[in-house]
Image: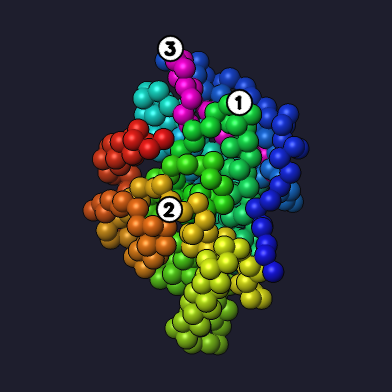
Amino acid sequence: MSVDIFKYKISEYNDGFIVDKIEDRSAYEVLKLIYKSPIVTRYEENNNVISYVYKPKTQCNKVIVLLHYMFEKVRLTQRILALYFVAHNYCAIEFTLPYHLERTPRGHSSGDLFLTADPHQNFESYRQAVIDLRVLADFLNFRNINKIGITGISIGALVLNTLMGVDARFQVGVPIAGGGGLHYIVEKGLKKRYVKEAYFNVKNQNEKEVFEKINKTFHKYLREVWLSREVKNPPDGLEWFLIDPLTYAKFNYPRNILMINGAVDFVIPKEAVLEFREAVGNPPIEWIPSLHTTTGLLLPFVLGKMHEFFEKNL
């Protein structure tokens, strides 16, 4: 049966945006944007989507949305990117993923409810991120801004890769340290044992055999989705197929993206990078000499490549 897990009612959000100016500089201003998430969770803090919009004082008709990495606690990298793009006459939006930063529930750390031992909780967090970003596109469209680019790091790149297959309004993307195939990342990249046990149910089982079985099931599922161009309900217990970037790889295809990946990334395995790249039409890729966690050290190079790509394609 065909299924769309990213649906919401657009009409509910036409007048639901709160915008306050919080910073006014000679060349740009910063606005705080708040709206209610279509996904209502039991944590009130997480139900408000918070973004920061950097606007140059000159006319601006292009936007770059910035997605942070997992467990982000400060907005340093986002702010550097935002200031860079606003200086080049783009609007830039620092978006907050569910359960991070201001959306972190009291008593928790930023991001620790996004990736848990509960696969359904993780599924809903990821799904919420995609839907909240679709509402952000509505906000921009209501203001006649239709040229939308997006970049993200790590989990931000994974969300980006799913989002662009779901919503073609995000026209140009630069995923950094991302890919597709969440099972590769859980099995080979994540060090959190409880996540493996939750996703693969490997207690008292041979982990390699379980992984190979899931890998085979997932690729059979992908063939069915890609051939029919309809997202199907996955087998029981495997709902995370519905958020995987590979599931949506043939939608909005070929993908107008520039991939930037670390050559020595132990969190996002090369299988997750290369299979996703092939599935979305072999877009250009920059391999940089970094680990997953040291991409920021090469930020000047990355910024130059991003700017060049957005200037050419957006």
Q: Which mark identifies residue 195?
A: none
What stretch of residues is rendered in magenta? 47-63
The answer to the question of whether label 2 and label 3 lie on touching residues, with beta carbons closer than 8 A, is no
* The quadrant where residue 261 appears: bottom left
Q: Nearer the viewer, mark 1 or mark 3?
A: 1
- Which numbered marker is on residue 143? 1
Location of residue 295 in the rendering, given as x and y in whole percent from the top left corner: 32, 48
Which quadrant of the rendered structure holds the N terminus? bottom right
Tag 1–tag 2 contact (CB < 8 Å):
no
Compared to residue 291, the image places residue 60 above or below, namely above
Dominant secondary-structure state across the stretch colored magenta: strand
Q: Is residue 153 visible?
A: no
Residue 256 as seen in the image, left or right of residue 12:
left
Residue topped by disc 3: 26
At label 3, which amino acid type do we have?
A: Ser
Q: Amino acid at mark 2?
A: Pro
Is residue 50 rendered magenta in the image? yes
Looking at this view, name the residue that lies furthest to the front. Answer: 228
Observer-side mark, 1 or 2, equals 2
Whichever of labels 2 and 3 marks the residue nearer the N terminus, that label is: 3
Q: Is residue 184 above or below residue 212?
A: above
CA neighbours of label 3 inside 10 A, class few (<14), some (14 to 19), many (20+): few
| Mark count | 3
Q: Quadrant of the C terminus?
A: top left
Quickly name the residue at label 2.
Answer: 254
Q: Position of residue 302 (x, y in %)?
A: 30, 42
Q: Is residue 61 above or below residue 102?
A: above
Residue 112, relative to residue 266: is it above or below? above
Q: Residue at x 27, y 58 (%)?
A: 263
Residue 205: percent from the left, percent from the top? 53, 87
